[in-house]
Image: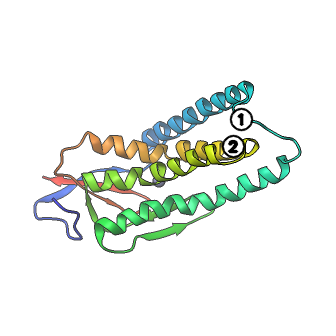
Amino acid sequence: MKSTWTLPEGYGQKYLIDLKDNKKQFWIVNGLSIGIMVLLLALLALLLWEGALELSSQQLPLQLLVMALGYVAYIPLHELAHGVFMRRYSGKRANYGFTLVYAYAGSECYFTKHDHRVISLAPVTFWGVVFLLLMFLLPVSWRWVAYIWQLFNLSGAAGDFYVFWRLGKEPDTILCQDTGVKMTVFDRL
Ligand SMILES: [Zn+2]
């Protein structure tokens, strides 16, 4: 099966994934996000205490600025990674949207389970590798900055992990349309 722009005959809506308005999904995803954050902050404290990461008070103001700017840049770059794979599987450019509180990449295409699972995890995987490499390549005093970016990358991907896991439980016949705000799962009725 391939991703398609027209819903095949006999297909109908099975359920919605709405991480903003569905209370249960909202709390699962935000709980997971906070859990990842707490775990990684505890690990950060351990790494600083162990001396594997270092903080220097001299460079701190500059580092905080770079960290903040990097985070602002990361938000659209995360969505871009979703969009690149949406384009790859649908043949058309994804739709991008940015508001002050969140950003999204979406498409009207009906993606197969396989394709949508790749789209879900593309950003966290790609940027995860980039930040991991930075943690080894940067001077020791800058490594914690890359660590914090990694923390944002992993905790911010809670919604993507949830979608990946949820689709994993579905049969291979499903198709999903992800407009960026809501995701609709279709199957043969
Ligand atoms: Zn994402």
Q: Earlier in the sequence, mark 2 or mark 1?
A: 1
Quarter in which the N terminus is drawn:
bottom left
- Residue in view at x 55 percent, y 42 percent: 155
| Residue found at the very far left of the displayed protein | 10
Of 18 and 156, the residue lying toward us: 156
x, y (%) of residue 115? Answer: 28, 56
x, y (%) of residue 27? Answer: 49, 38
Q: Across the whole image, how many numbered discs are drawn on residues? A: 2
x, y (%) of residue 82? Answer: 43, 60
Q: Horizontal placement of 151 versus 22: left or right? A: right
What amino acid does circle 2 point to? Arg
What amino acid does circle 1 point to? Leu
x, y (%) of residue 182? Answer: 40, 57
Q: Residues within 10 Å of mark 2 (few under 14, many from 20)?
A: many
Asked if labels 1 and 2 touch by Cβ distance under 8 angstroms, the answer is yes
Q: Horizontal placement of 64 versus 102: left or right? A: right
Q: Which residue is mark 1?
A: 53
Q: Secondary structure at mark 1?
A: loop
Q: Which residue is mark 2?
A: 143
Q: Is residue 20 visible?
A: no
- Residue in view at x 34 percent, y 40 percent: 165
**Colour pattern:** rainbow
